[in-house]
Amino acid sequence: MNAWYLLPVIFICSLFLTRLLRVYALSHSLIDVPNVRSSHLNPTPRGGGVAIVLSFLLFLPLLSIEGYLSWAQAFGLIGAGGVVALLGFLDDHGHVAARWRLLGHFIAACWALYWVASLPPLIIFGVDVNIGPFAYIIAAIYLVWMLNLYNFMDGIDGIASIEAVTVCLSAVLLYFVSGFPQLIWGPLLLAFAVSGFLYWNFPPARIFMGDAGSGFLGITLAIFSLQAANVFSNFFWCWLILLGVFIVDATFTLIRRLLRGDKVYEAHRSHAYQFASRRFGNHFSVTLAVGLINIFWLLPLAYLVVIDFFDGVVALLFAYVPLIFIAVKYNAGAVEAR
């Protein structure tokens, strides 16, 4: 079987599953009703991200059957992603206490680390740094933070979908040009699964992703980054660069709210992208800007790391400084106006 034929099938599967989930959400009153914490104005069905999860996980084993992906990697992605998606699905339908969600997230992270890979030794300013067993602890925290920050950043129409598609396709391009085409299939499948959902989620959104989809995307992208880093360590810096918009906005906002003494687990709309969407009066401009930043700023910098033109940490700092400036400009983490 040629795996390329899977891609349009996955897109169509995600497209129609999202439509079915929209009908399901409307019939079961799974609706996000706008309130003072919302960034949208109209009641909108939620939970459409389940289409991404099902489309990706159902077709993933076919890659292993045909030898495009090891079974260990498939087990890691299916188990970790499935646990996170299930927790998000239950939370979308009711409420799961934060402590139990966090426990489930760490269980999913440990599962991924067992089957896929931990954080490998990294080259930092030209020096090989190996932290031994502590790499597992740092990698687990990294996976959990990535899945939660992705959930935090899924607050306006299309932004989490555009981020996933542009980051995955950028990674695929980097794998090709650097001579590691065996790594492309996971990100390619995910990009096409998300694209089918994006048809319904593009501004103005007809359905929202929900926690099941956003958390799943966060941990899956983080697993991809560890998988790639264990093949070529520079890829880890590349992934951190490509995910820079989400990492900087979420982390900057969290730190600022922590320093102010806010309850960070409570819903809010104080991310830079949320302030920006209110300033521009629409979601489309901000979502489009995220995609353009990923393609025209972050991807070229990641490419320079791949070809060893830049040290990974230097490129990361170079990539993040303008993003931090944007976060400051748009008041990330500031007290929301009432």
Image (cartoon, helix red, strand yellow):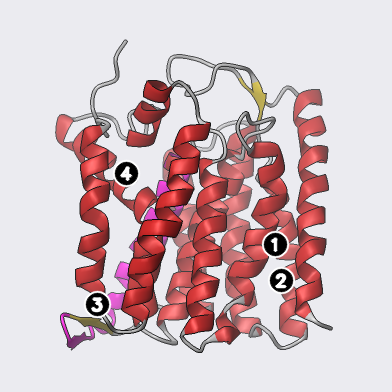
- Residue type at numbered disc 3: Phe
- Residue type at numbered disc 2: Leu
**C-alpha span from label 2 to label 4:** 31 Å
The answer to the question of whether label 1 and label 2 lie on touching residues, with beta carbons closer than 8 A, is: yes
The residue segment tinted magenta is 125-152
Residue 148 in the magenta stretch? The answer is yes
Which one is closest to the eye, mark 3 or mark 1? 3
Secondary structure type for disc 1: helix
**What residue is pinned by disc 2?**
60
Residue 274 in the magenta stretch? The answer is no
- Residue type at numbered disc 4: Asp
Earlier in the chain: of badge 3 and badge 2, it is 2
Earlier in the chain: of badge 3 and badge 1, it is 1
Q: List x then y, in percent, for residue 160.
A: 52, 45
Q: List x then y, in percent, for residue 225.
A: 44, 71
Mark on residue 56? 1
